Amino acid sequence: MNETLALQFTHRSDRSFSTAPISDDLLESIIEAAWHAPSSMNAQHVSLVVVRDAAKRARIAELAGGQPWIAEAPVFITVIVDFNKTSVGLQNVGATQHIHESVDGFAAGAVDAGIALGNLMLAARSLGLGVVAIGGLRRNPQEMIDLLELPALTYPIVGVTIGHIATPAQPKPRLPLASFRHDERYHAEAIAPAIATYDKVLPEYWHSIGRADGLPWSANLAKPYSQGFYRATKPVAAKQGFVQEQ
Amino acid sequence: MNETLALQFTHRSDRSFSTAPISDDLLESIIEAAWHAPSSMNAQHVSLVVVRDAAKRARIAELAGGQPWIAEAPVFITVIVDFNKTSVGLQNVGATQHIHESVDGFAAGAVDAGIALGNLMLAARSLGLGVVAIGGLRRNPQEMIDLLELPALTYPIVGVTIGHIATPAQPKPRLPLASFRHDERYHAEAIAPAIATYDKVLPEYWHSIGRADGLPWSANLAKPYSQGFYRATKPVAAKQGFVQEQ
């Protein structure tokens, strides 16, 4: 077990931070870890907007649906799917970009945003800091675009809060490995038993951390996954130029 | 500079592998690193299909557009955006899943696939192995779905080849950091100068590794980003149940 694996195996989402600042040096290291991440076609269609300004963080905390840790921790980084850079590159050689209109382009950008986000989180944790990924900024994407002055062909897809941990969180158990690792082909028969197990395990975790209102996995997802998902993503992404393929 | 940052700062895509196998123990560690990755809403909508079978790897090498390293290296892992598991969970509590029909759902799944992919790559590299991410499996997604026996509500979004390195690759320079890190707001004025610099730097890199046919970044992307992107993603994703939002 090396240091990197040990960090990966103990991922947790912290939401209790002090307001102590993060030094420029640490922040640079975290950002450069994401900068070196690979990307589809070496297209590098990811950018970061690093927010330390307290008023902006307070606004993002609201836009993300009321997440006070965004305002408390000193750094919030928005990971941007950025096809503006590639579009400028194509213009330089007399070509017109169309990939951003496709489902494939948006998906490839989202995958690369995920790689960058993962690097940010692991780099920060390797430096003793706490992190929590924030998808809730897709709840109000136009307001995020306005706040961060994002141009066409860019989209704020996910973010991460980074700070010094006040009270450490406990790592959450995962669905059994048999439902995650499929050898040679997808094993559909492994899914239902894994969920049945996990729907018992997760309430035990909630109980162990004193959360009396914690639901089993299946019940917890029922509302957001049947009706409560972020419907602004499609129209606002389209307004930015994305996912218009016929 | 700790061990994790050192690995992140030196990411490279290796394409020269021996055929030596990867032990079960190492492979388990790599997979568990991805298993512990966080996910949007703790929905865990990622699965891995681990292919060691040589004939299957040879087929994937073809489907990905002719990438012989997939056949040479001993392990290929496909990262699946998997809303089948959540759908089964919702059925258990009498709810019907709709998030997979949305652009937001597919994007959230792609981000989480990216986090998992990043963990796979970093875990493998921490163990001395080489990796190269493979987006080219989206060139022939239906054939990948058939080969891996993927059910509805799953999509093979990206993959990774893992093996013992024969001849090490050289890390590729990135677009200047000023076009990646934006403080407080997006700095559109930073993009054109960064690209101008990079369009000089990248040919120097190609020259240094003996690639006489290497193009500047902008010229390299002109064809795939104007017209050569993967148009099968939208219809095949729709057939699997994704991105049907009106």
Image: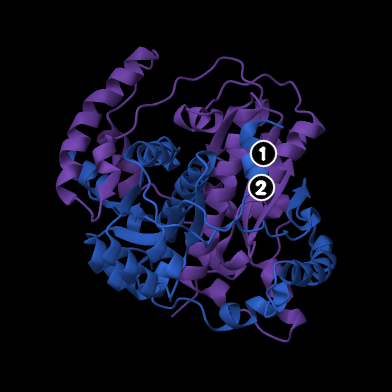
Chain colours: A purple, B blue
Q: Relative to A83, does residue A76 appear above or below in the rendering?
A: above
Which dot marks residue B10? 2
Which dot marks residue B6? 1
Q: Quadrant of residue B173?
A: bottom right
Relative placement, left or right, of A18 versus B95 is right
Which residue reaches farthest bottom?
A94
Residues at discs 2 and 1 in contact (Cβ within 8 Å): yes
Counting from the top left corner in percent of width and height, residue A110 is at 52, 57
Helix, strand, or loop for circle 1? helix
Helix, strand, or loop for circle 2? loop
Of B66 and A147, nearer the camera is B66
Of A107 and A26, nearer the camera is A26
Q: Amino acid at mark 1?
A: Ala
Q: Relative to A16, does residue A230 appear above or below in the rendering?
A: below
Quarter of the image that includes the N terminus of chain B: top right
Label 1: how many Cα within 10 Å (few below 14, some 14–19, many 20+): few
Counting from the top left corner in percent of width and height, residue B77 is at 37, 54
